[in-house]
Image (cartoon, rainbow, N blue to C red):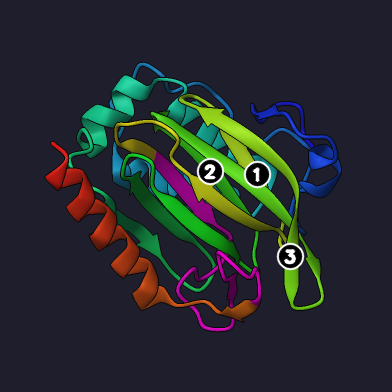
Amino acid sequence: MTSDLSRRTFLAGAMGTLAVGAGATAARSPLAGPRLTETFEVERFVDDVTRARAQGQTAVGEVLARAVSEPGRVLTGLGAPTEAGFDVLHHSDELTILNVIWAPLMVLLPHDHRMWASIGIYTGREDNIVWKRKGDIVEAAGASSLSEKEVYPLGVDEVHSVVNPIERLTGAIHIYGGDFFAPGRSEWDAETLVQRPFDVDGLREKFRAANERFEAGR
């Protein structure tokens, strides 16, 4: 993996499975100049990511890392998280950018993207388990624990699941190198680990239910 994308990998084998997606480049992006004194602006961020997209995942990761390196700016620009859910900051055939808010202790099933993805944490924690396909099922292959200011890349063929391990909301910017909402993706059952079609409506329902639990526990 590229050493400039910060993450804390703690299970053996994770480094070998987390390959940067196709089209990534090791060259430093010309967008890498610091803009840390500026206020985080969604439109400018989307524009920076869109231009970096043409250079590959590494360049996008640099833009994302720059943004989350000052979490207070992101919180000011996006607003402090108040409930679980996800906001679409940008959506096209080539690029999707989401502001994802995980409810406390929320768990998301193993799933794939069929495209590369980069995750940047600006408040809280996000734990990722990486899974390896074995026919129609998956088995755990590695994991990473992400704290604020950290960026984590996932390759095109990666399968992962997500846990917010803390008892407060976690905020993360998720960038995908394609249309996140397009059909054809898969998820795996939490108990049997058997493959099935990815359910976007089911994803929304998970956020709704998690948010209800969060509100009830306040």
Residue 60 visible? The answer is no
Q: Which amino acid, by three-letter code, is at mark 3?
A: Val
- Marked residue nearer the N-terminal end (2 or 1): 2
Dominant SS of magenta comes to loop
Which image quarter: residue 98? Answer: bottom left
Q: Do labels 2 and 3 touch, CB within 8 Å?
A: no
Whether tag 2 and tag 1 are in contact, CB under 8 A, the answer is: yes
Question: Which residue corresponds to the image point at 65% horizontal and 35% vertical from the top-left?
Answer: 144
Taking depth in this image into account, of 177 and 41 the one nearest to the observer is 177
Instruction: Tell me the quarter of the picture where residue 206 sits.
Output: bottom left
Which residue in the protein does label 3 denote? 138
Q: Mark 2 points at which residue?
A: 119
Residue 193 percent across, percent down from the top left: 65, 68
| 123 horizontally vs 193: left or right | left
Select label 1 or label 3 by which is in front: 3
- Residue at the location (45% across, 77% down)? 199
User: For residue 161: magenta?
Assistant: no
Q: Quadrant of the image for the C terminus?
A: top left
Q: How far apart are marks 2 and 3 (CA)?
A: 22 Å
Q: Earlier in the sequence, mark 2 or mark 3?
A: 2
Circle 1 sits in a helix, a strand or a loop, which is it? strand
Q: Give the range drawn in magenta.
A: 172-194
Q: Position of residue 168 (x, y in %)?
A: 29, 32
Residue at image position (41%, 75%) is 200
Amino acid of disc 2: Ile
